[in-house]
Amino acid sequence: MKKSAGILMYKEAESGFLILLVHPGGPFWHKRDEGAWSIPKGEYKEDEEAEAAARREFAEETGHVPEGKLQPLGQLRQKSGKHVIAFALEGEFDTSSLRSNMFEIEWPPRSGRMQTFPEVDRAEWFALAEARQKIVSGQAPFLERLEALHTAAAQRVVDQMGKE
């Protein structure tokens, strides 16, 4: 079973959450938009901790080393059968600084020509509603889990203020 780990970076804005998503590079994804974006993630082996893999993959796909406490968002099984574990991280990332690892494939198919493409060709911040439209369907529950996590944290603050 293939496993991936990733980070769902978010930040708060006046209008609510902004979610960082990345667009896969390469010719297969070039013209796809809605339902094509993802959290920065990648595969990891049994001997690697999921949190360490999530941080490594985020750095490889964006060029940015994520710092801060990761909040678990659980695991999902995508249509492909791959299991994805995600962590939420409140943070900042300048999308114009994107630097992704590269991969090589034969393109066009059966041409004998190898071409190099970035793993990720774009990164953007989206409002939560728009992120729900952009993200691959198999990862959409991570957005709901982030929203629930934030709502629960806000309620704890309100409850604590009521006790003071």
Image: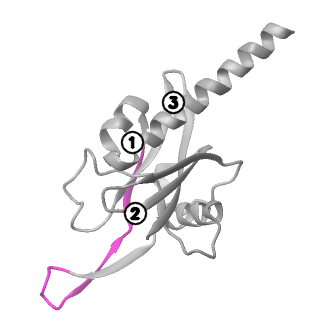
Helix, strand or loop under label 1: helix
Q: Position of residue 19 (x, y in %)?
A: 47, 39
Asked whether residue 93 is in view, the answer is: no
Q: Which residue is mark 2?
A: 82
Q: What residue would you read off at disc 3?
A: 17
Residue type at the position of mark 1: Ala
Q: Are marks 2 and 3 in contact (CB under 8 Å)?
A: no
Q: CA distance from mark 3 to mark 1?
A: 15 Å
Q: Earlier in the sequence, mark 2 or mark 1?
A: 2
Q: Nearer the viewer, mark 2 or mark 1?
A: 2
Quadrant of the image containing the C terminus: top right
Mark 2–mark 1 distance (CA, rounded to whole Å): 15 Å
Which residue is label 1 attached to? 140
Identify the residue at image location x=53%, y=65%: 57
User: Which-is-in-front pick, marks 2 and 3?
Assistant: 2
Looking at the image, residue 94 lies above or below residue 6? above
* Residue drawn at the location 52% of the way across and 30% of the way down: 147
Q: Is residue 62 magenta?
A: no
Query: Which stretch appears magenta?
Result: 107-124
Amino acid bearing label 3: Phe
> In this rendering, would 18 be left or right of 25?
right
